Structure formats: structure tokens, C-alpha cells
Amino acid sequence: MIKKLVAWLVFLVLALYGLVLALVYFFTPQLMFPAPKPSYCAGELVKKINAGSDIIAVRVNKNSSADNWIIYSHGNGEDLGQIDLLMQEYAARLNANVVSYDYPGYGVSMGHASEDRLGEYADAVYDYTVKELGADPKRIYFVGYSLGSVPAAYLAAKHLDARGAVLIGGIAEGAKTYLPVNVIPWKILPNVENVQKIQIPLLIIHGTADGVVNYSNAVQNYKAAKAASTLRLAALSGMGHYGLFRCAPYWRELEEFIKNEKRESVELKYDQNSCIAL
């Protein structure tokens, strides 16, 4: 009787695991790219560029006194309209020109976003920034938030002459966004593989109470980034995944890294009291 019960329990566990794998396999695109309803119109200061067969929407926040450039890759539940005020603040606070873009299927970008094509979008935006906007490759920073950490790390690993990279609430492995361990027997957004190739200065900012992309992702990326010329990890205690830009250390770290170019290798942990809303 006990053996039969154990056998049934094993069968149920395996069946449930198989169901989970099937759901992950078939619904990964929807989970990774849940594009919101467009928050802006096609004519609102948006430039359209080609990326293969897709059309990518790009917005540029210029700072006339700036030499530095930031290519910003946003999270999976937002578009250019939703991040526009933040990008304006980036340009002003960090004394930089900021180029942000929408993945296909987001905002007014055409096509369908996919894991395989993230690199193509990033390449197209980089080429546009250098060739069309005239940015000096040695003055470019790659900044990625959440899902955007994937194209940001991809570009940072590829362009060894760039100024630096910043991963905010970034992914190490797609399957570990919610779970502390990878229970999926195939790779989903294996971002850590690019992180370990980064040789330019790297800043990692992550909330320790992040319930969307577990803080363990930041730790894994930090440990993997051994090739980075300098490395900073800023752990924002008690902060979650959203609203990090309202936390004072968020801007302090970005300003020291990008505006003031303070880049010593260090692991920092801000207590919760320092993460007051601005």
C-alpha cells in the first residue's frame, strides 16, 4: 500500500513538472515580452529605423553640453512613452545624450519580439547611434533595466571600446527571475554568459527585496563578471523591482559611475533608511 502511494506521488510530481515545462516552453514569449498597450503615438518625437525585417522606434533625449551617450534598454512591461520622463531625467542628471528604443511589438515598433532577436535590435540601435547620430563609441554606456539587461550585456560584451555598462534589476538567467534555482532543462535568456565576457567597467544595481527578478540574479552576475575592468554592486536593501529611480542611492551610483566616472571595484549595501523617496 505504501509503495503504491509513493509511486502515485512520484507520478503526480513528474506529471506536474512535465506540465510546468510544457507551459514554459509554449508561453515563454508571452511571459518574457508582455508588451503593454502603446502609450504614445507614432509622430511623437520618434525616429523609426530598420532592424532586419522589423521597424524599431527610437527616441533621443539630447543634452547639448554632453559628450557621453547612453543606450537605454527598458523593461518588458513598458514602452518609450512610459519611460520618457525618466529618460529626460537621465539626460539632465547624468549630463548625457540618451537613446532609448522599443522592442518590436512595443509602442509603435513593428514585428514580434523574441529572445533570438534582442541582439539584432540592440545592434541596429547601436549602429544608428554611432553612424547616424555621430556618437563616439568610446563615450557610450549601455544601460539595461530588467529584461533590458539582456541587450545591454550583449552590447557590453561585444563593444570592448565602450565607456561602461549598467545592469539595473538585471537577469542572470530567465528561469531564475522568480526562482532561486534553474529547474528548466534548457536555456532561457542566459544573460550571465554575456556578463562574464564584459571587459569594460560594470555597475550592477539591484533591490534586495526584488520579487520579480530575484536578488540572486545580481549576485550571480556579480560573481560572473570577473573580466570587467572595474565592478560595482549596489544592493538597495528592502527595495523591490519597481521605482528604484525614486531611491537616492540609485542616482548616486549612476552619477558616480557615469557623470563623475568613479569606478573602483566595490560591493556596497545601502540600508533601507537610505532608500528614501526623492
Image (cartoon, grey):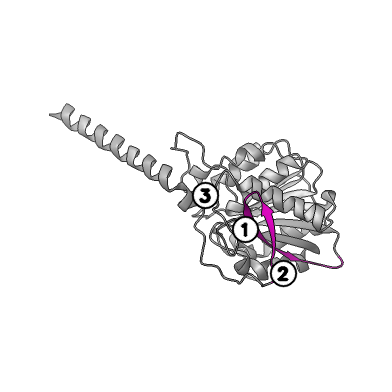
Q: Quadrant of residue 24?
A: top left
- Whether residue 12 is visible, yes or no, is yes
170 or 55: nearer the viewer: 55
168 or 272: nearer the viewer: 168
| Crowd class of label 3 (few under 14; some 14 to 19; many from 20; radius 10 Å) | many
> Looking at the image, which residue is at 51% across and 41% down?
188
- Residue type at mark 3? Asn
| Crowd class of label 1 (few under 14; some 14 to 19; many from 20; radius 10 Å) | many
| Crowd class of label 2 (few under 14; some 14 to 19; many from 20; radius 10 Å) | some
Q: Which residues are magenta?
A: 45-65
Q: Secondary structure at mark 2?
A: helix
Name the side, left or right, on which 254 lies relative to 175.
right
| Image coords of residue 112 (percent x, y) | 54, 53
Q: Which marked residue is nearer to the observer: mark 2 or mark 3?
A: 2
Sooner in the amino-acid sequence: mark 1 or mark 3: 1
- Residue type at mark 2? Gln
Give the number of the disc on residue 88.
2
| Image coords of residue 176 (percent x, y) | 50, 44
256 or 187: nearer the viewer: 187
Residue to which mark 1 is pinned = 74
Q: Are marks 2 and 1 in contact (CB under 8 Å)?
A: no
122 or 153: nearer the viewer: 122
Sooner in the amino-acid sequence: mark 2 or mark 1: 1
Q: Is residue 170 placed above or below 1 in the rendered structure?
A: below
Does the magenta-highlighted stretch encompass residue 260?
Answer: no
| Image coords of residue 208 (percent x, y) | 56, 53
- Residue type at mark 1? His
Residue to which mark 3 is pinned = 214
Q: Is residue 179 placed above or below 107 in the rendered structure?
A: above
> Looking at the image, which residue is at 52% across and 60% down?
35
